[in-house]
Image: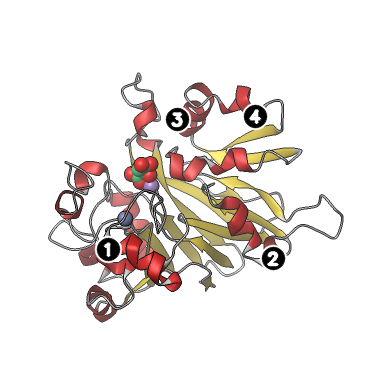
Amino acid sequence: MLLQVLGTAAGGGLPQWNCACPGCSGARAHPHWRRRHASLAVRADRDRWYIVNATPDIGDQIESVAGLWPGPEPRRTPVAGLVLTDAELDHTLGIARLREAKSLEVLTTAPVCDALLTKLRLGEVLGPYTRLGWRDLPLDRPVPLTPGSGVEISAIPVSGKRPRYAAGGPGGPDDGAWVVALRLTERATGTTALYAPALAAWPPALHRAATEADCVIVDGTFWDDEEPRRSGISARTATGMGHLPIDGPGGTARLLAPLTGRRLYTHLNNTNPLVDPAAPQHKVLAELGIEVAADGMVIEP
Ligand code: MLT
Ligand code: MN
Ligand code: ZN
C-alpha cells in the first residue's frame, strides 16, 4: 500500500491568513514550518489514486506530487476520486476546486453526503460544471477502493460531531457517521492503515482497529485540552471543539503509546507547539515511539 501525505495542518493551515500567533509567525519566518491542510492520497492501483479530504489547498497538493499529474492525454488524470472523513469545510471546500473534471466520484457516509447536498448545496452549485458521483462509504464492511483495486476501504464511526454550518438539524439513523476513521487494507498482504484526522471520541471499535493496524495516522490538532483557551482562539477546550488533545489524562498519546504499529499525528492546529520543529514536545512523542506526519511524506505500511 502506498500513502502520500499531502498536508498535515488543521483548518486555516500554517500560516493562517489572519493569524500572527507564534506558530503562524514562525511559518512566515521559516518556510520549512509551513503545512498545508491535512490530506492523504491513497494509491488504488498502478496509476489511480484517491484523495482523502478535499482541502482548500487541493490544487497545490496535486501539483506537489508528480504521481498525481495528468497525462499523457491532455485531460487524463490519475486522481480517480475523493474520500471524505467528515463534512468540515477544511475537508470539503476543495471539491469546488476540482470542478474542471468531467465527473468526480466522492465516497462519503450518508450524513456527510446529505450535508454537502442540502446545506452547502454542492449538487446545485457544481451541477453546471461537473457531475458529482456520490458513492456510499460503507461502515465496517470493506469494499475495493475502485473496481479491481487491491486496496479495500471501510469506515469506522467516530462521532456525531457536525460541522457548524449543519448544526442542530434533525437526527438520522446514521448520526454516528458524521465523522469516521478510514481503514485501508491491502488485500494481498493484509497490511492495514487507519486514517482519522478528526477525533472527538475514541470508541471501542476504533481502539480495536488501531490495535490491529500496521500504521495509524490520527488527529493531532491540539497538544493539550486548554490550548485553544490559553491561546485565545476559542472559549472552548480542545475536547469541547471536537478534538481529543494529544497530551494529558484524556489525551491520545496515552492510547497510542502501547500500540505496536507505526503511529503519526496529523491535522496540527497553528497553536500546537509541535508546529515548531524545535519544540520539546517532539522529544516527548519520540520517546513514546510516536511521529508527527510531514507534508510530502510517503508511507508504505
Ligand atoms: C475542525 O477540525 O474542528 C474544523 O475544521 C473547524 C473549522 O472548520 O473551522
Ligand atoms: Mn478540521
Ligand atoms: Zn496562528
For mark 2, does the 10 Å Cα neighbourhood hold few (<14), some (14 to 19), or many (20 or more) residues? some
Q: CA distance from mark 1 to mark 2?
A: 34 Å
Q: CA distance from mark 4 to mark 1?
A: 38 Å
**Tag 3 secondary structure:** helix
In the image shown, does 260 or 241 lie closer to the viewer?
241
Q: CA distance from mark 2 to mark 3?
A: 32 Å
Please identify, in this view, whether the residue under mark 3 or under mark 1 is nearer the observer. 1
Find residue 272 and report its horizontal and vertical position in percent: 27, 61
Q: Quadrant of residue 130?
A: top right
Whether ligand 3 has any atom under 8 Å from the Cβ at mark 1 is answered as yes
Quickly name the residue at label 2. Answer: 67
In the drawing, what numbered circle is on residue 126? 4
For marks 4 and 1, the one nearer the N-term is: 1
Amino acid type at image mark 1: Pro
For marks 1 and 2, the one nearer the N-term is: 1
Quadrant containing the N terminus in the rendered view: bottom right
Amino acid type at image mark 2: Gly
Please identify, in this view, whether the residue under mark 2 or under mark 4 is nearer the observer. 4
Amino acid type at image mark 4: Leu
For mark 1, does the 10 Å Cα neighbourhood hold few (<14), some (14 to 19), or many (20 or more) residues? some
Quickly name the residue at label 1. Answer: 22
**Tag 4 secondary structure:** helix
In the drawing, what numbered circle is on residue 111? 3
Residue 189 in view (yes/no): yes
For mark 4, does the 10 Å Cα neighbourhood hold few (<14), some (14 to 19), or many (20 or more) residues? some
Amino acid type at image mark 3: Pro
